[in-house]
Image (cartoon, rainbow, N blue to C red):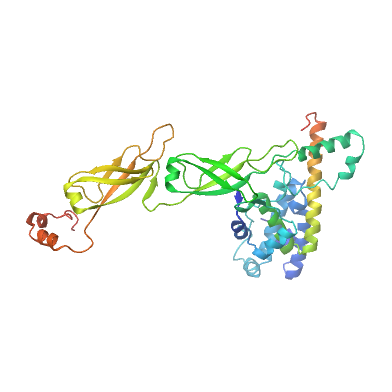
Amino acid sequence: MSMSKQEFLSSAGLEIQTLELWLEQRWLIPRETTAGMHFSERDMARANLILELKSDFGVNDEGVDVILHLMDQLHGMRGALAELQEHIRGKPA
Amino acid sequence: MNNPYEVLGVEQSAPPAEIQKAYRKLAKKLHPDLNPGNKAAEEKFKEVASAYDLLSDAEKRKRFDNGEIDASGAERPQHQYYRDFATADDGHPYTTSSGYADFMDSDDAFAELLRRHRRAAANRRGEDLHFRLAIDFAESITGADKRLALPVGGTLDVKIPPGIVDGQTLRLKGKGAPGTGTGGPGDALIEVEVLPDPRFARDGDNIVLELPISLSEAVLGGPVRVPTPTGDVAMSVPKGSNTGTTLRLKGKGAPRRGGGNGDELVKLKVVLPKSPDPELENFVSNWARGKAFNPREGMSS
């Protein structure tokens, strides 16, 4: 399932200017196609997290940047760790 | 749900700022995206978030304090967390190896495994590319060969199969973005838009067309030319045809799954001359049997 920019904006409740800023910071990296940008459910979940960090947690933009960067590293490590676990079990991926 | 004040660990008299502080403290520990490996955190977080939703809304909080509403029904709807997508193995642009890259530098088996993990990520299939293509109604029935100009340069030849419907997506294997390493290219996905034709409408495998005929063609019958997606064909209107009479042109519709074609259904519509005709008026006013015929018979109450 993927969404156009317009669908994404209304579904996430975002202003266009906010989205432009997030794209510029590379907080969101949608797929670029000839028919415009396509947003996945992953992009939507990520946008929801950013909104939550900002509104519920009181994190400012600088903080969001740091959190996302650490979180992306954490998920990279979780992926590597999962692979190690598979290997130890004797079925390397 | 339990008492929201107890869930957040605040007094019932706590000011909004204190409620927010209590929520943030708990949420930082429990938010599923800040605890990607903790399955139990999600349930607890849901409870905390629901309590906060209730107590952070002054109106709802007042009604809860007055006993007008209880805490149930305030549960947050099902929420999709980023962590559910973060470890998907189809590759995505967010995850990075910069958190463990230094471990890959040594010679041991552990480093080798990590390097292999990164190589696997490096041999990713290319992205699927999405395109849109508009075609004429007639082309949707007969099929067509189209050439799509790509914004990145180059073209893509697309074979439109006969009988395609509006919104259908064609997949061209291997015509998407190139992959990395041995990953191979993605596919091109082409969403086809069928432009409406004022003459035709599609009804499953059949095509419906409204054909205006003159009064004399309706009364006396006769040959007419009928447009179809493959060009005009001759058809004879039977004597005594009426508005709503439907004639069938066999095999002039869209291709059927499993062979053969649907039909074109030609709905006749009797149209009087544009300007009043004295001869016609004269004839009708002297036409006794015409006046005796009541087309609304059985309609009167």
Q: In the figure, residue B49 lies in which quadrant? A: bottom right
Q: In the figure, residue B22 lies in which quadrant? A: bottom right
Look at 81% across and 44% down and name the residue there: A77
- One can see residue A52 in this view: no
Look at 42% across and 45% down and name the residue there: B138
Look at 46% across and 40% down and name the residue there: B143
Instruction: Choose between B18 and B253: the one closer to the eye.
Output: B253
Report x, y in % for residue B275: 21, 64
- The answer to whether B290 appears left or right of B199 in the picture is left
**Quadrant of the drawing holding the C terminus of chain B:** bottom left
Report x, y in % for residue B57: 66, 67
- The answer to whether A8 appears left or right of B45 in the picture is left
**Quadrant of the drawing holding the N terminus of chain B:** bottom right
Instruction: Choose between A84 and B158: the one closer to the eye.
Output: B158
Report x, y in % for residue A79: 78, 42
Q: Is residue B237 above or below residue B71?
A: above
